[in-house]
Amino acid sequence: MADINIKAQAISLYCKQLKLPTFCDYENTIRQLDSNMSYEDFLLQLLRTETEQRQENNRKKRIKASKYPYIKTLDEFDTSRLKHVKEPFVFELAGCDYIDKHQNIVMIGNPGTGKTHLAISLGLKACTCGYSVRFYTAASLATELVEASEYKRLTKLEKQIAKVDLLILDELSYLSFNRHQSDLLFKIISDRSEKGSIIITTNLEFSRWTELFDNSTMVAALVDRITFRSHVLNMNGESYRKDSTTT
């Protein structure tokens, strides 16, 4: 018995040194194997379990780094409520091909039609597929950019945002931005043109974006950069906010 304990401790030590934590659960793997399976089968199962666990851990890290306000999945999204967007197209977007192509998604519609829910759901799919994502409301990003500018951290923040594969900019409609905020937001969006993807949710048609930005001459250029290589989803419809937290 003492010899078995020493071996178990040695295995645990090697697992820690080699950073193979799931190998420590080898006894459970042995119990699950068929008696006719070989040593190679045993090793293969250990490696498969380790790989799957690492993938799941990395997925959780990406989700945590994305800073979603809450978790909403595509399975929870009622696509039948969409009057102007076909369900197959939603699941096509969930395949994340638009991220590889550096395309954008702009969701335009009245409040309560599921824009934020769908944006988060697509972001979660991206995390599962191995992409890095960062979620902001437009107001929170504008505030963070201004604060970074004041404390000489703007370049660092801009580089951090530029590195993510998918930037989600939610609620571009509730607050207007002054000239400084407008310029900072414009640079973030402009720098991603053909280099990274953006999902934007808004209640306002493009023609009304002059109501948001103090720098009205910049709006045309901003819309041009956002809509270039983009999927524009008409999300107008009946609100179901009374039935859920979706916005």
Image: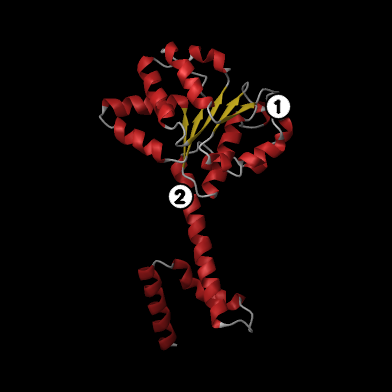
Q: Which residue is mark 2?
A: 61
Disc 1 marks which amino acid?
His
Residue 157 appears in the picture as rendered: yes
The answer to whether 174 is drawn above or below residue 246 in the figure is: above
The image quarter in which residue 95 lies: top right
> What residue is shown at x 71% (from left), y 37% (from top)?
87
> What residue is shown at x 34% (from left), y 34% (from top)?
157
- The mark that comes first in sequence, 2 or 1, is 2
Q: Residues within 10 Å of mark 1 (few under 14, many from 20)?
A: few
Disc 2 marks which amino acid?
Lys
Q: Residues within 10 Å of mark 2 (few under 14, many from 20)?
A: few
> What residue is shown at x 43% (from left), y 12% (from top)?
217
Q: Position of residue 123 (x, y in %)?
A: 54, 40
Query: Which quadrant holds the C terminus?
Result: top right
Q: Which residue is mark 1?
A: 84
Question: Which residue, as the protein is rendered here, is positioned at the far left?
Answer: 152
Q: Tell whether 148 sits left or right of 239.
A: left
The image quarter in which residue 97 lies: top right
Mark toward the viewer: 2 or 1: 1
* Camera-nearest residue between 54 and 229: 229
Residue 77 appears in the picture as rendered: no
The answer to whether 15 is drawn above or below residue 234 in the figure is: below
* Label of residue 60 in the image: none
Disc 2 is placed on an element classified as helix
Disc 1 is placed on an element classified as loop
Q: Position of residue 180 (x, y in %)?
A: 35, 18
